[in-house]
Image (cartoon, rainbow, N blue to C red):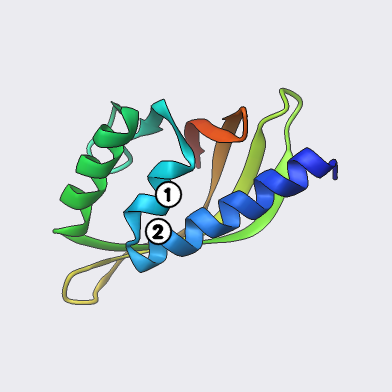
Amino acid sequence: MTPSASKDQDMLSFVYNAFNRRDIEPILAAMHADVEWPNGMEGGWVHGREGVRAYWLRQWKILDPHVVPVRFESDENGRLVVHVKQLVRDLNGTIILDRTVQHIYTIKDGLINRMDIQE
């Protein structure tokens, strides 16, 4: 793994831990101002840090998602692919989803520029 990829992996590990703690500010600081983020709950995309913030705050009012990276790799386009164990519960603790998905990150200048979800 290249030093850049290792640094990106460390940053994303930090981001996942912060997400699971619901600590938004450090995650947003790791994103480009015009980040493109998938709206996995409602479909489509959210744009920019404030779009991501609003999406997550809306999501956390109805769901309790936890995501744990289990493997990192690079794809042929230089993106970082994170295989993620995704466990989503409703607010009563009932499991809604328990699966592994791939989060595919485009990192630009050390910041998250885009994330795609692949199932």
Q: Position of residue 112 (x, y in %)?
A: 52, 35
Disc 1 element: helix
Question: How many numbered tags mark residues here?
Answer: 2
Disc 2 element: helix
Q: Position of residue 93 (x, y in %)?
A: 24, 76
Which image quadrant: the N terminus? top right
CB within 8 Å, label 1 to label 2: yes
Q: Nearer the viewer, residue 62 or 97?
A: 62
* Farthest-out residue, bottom: 93
Name the residue: 50% across, 42% down.
119
The 10 Å Cα crowd at callout 2, few under 14, some 14 to 19, many 20 or more, is some
Q: Is residue 11 left or right of residue 78?
A: left
Name the residue: 48% across, 34% down.
115
Q: Amino acid at mark 1?
A: Ile
In this rendering, the answer to whether 92 lies above or below 103 is below
The residue tagged 2 is 19
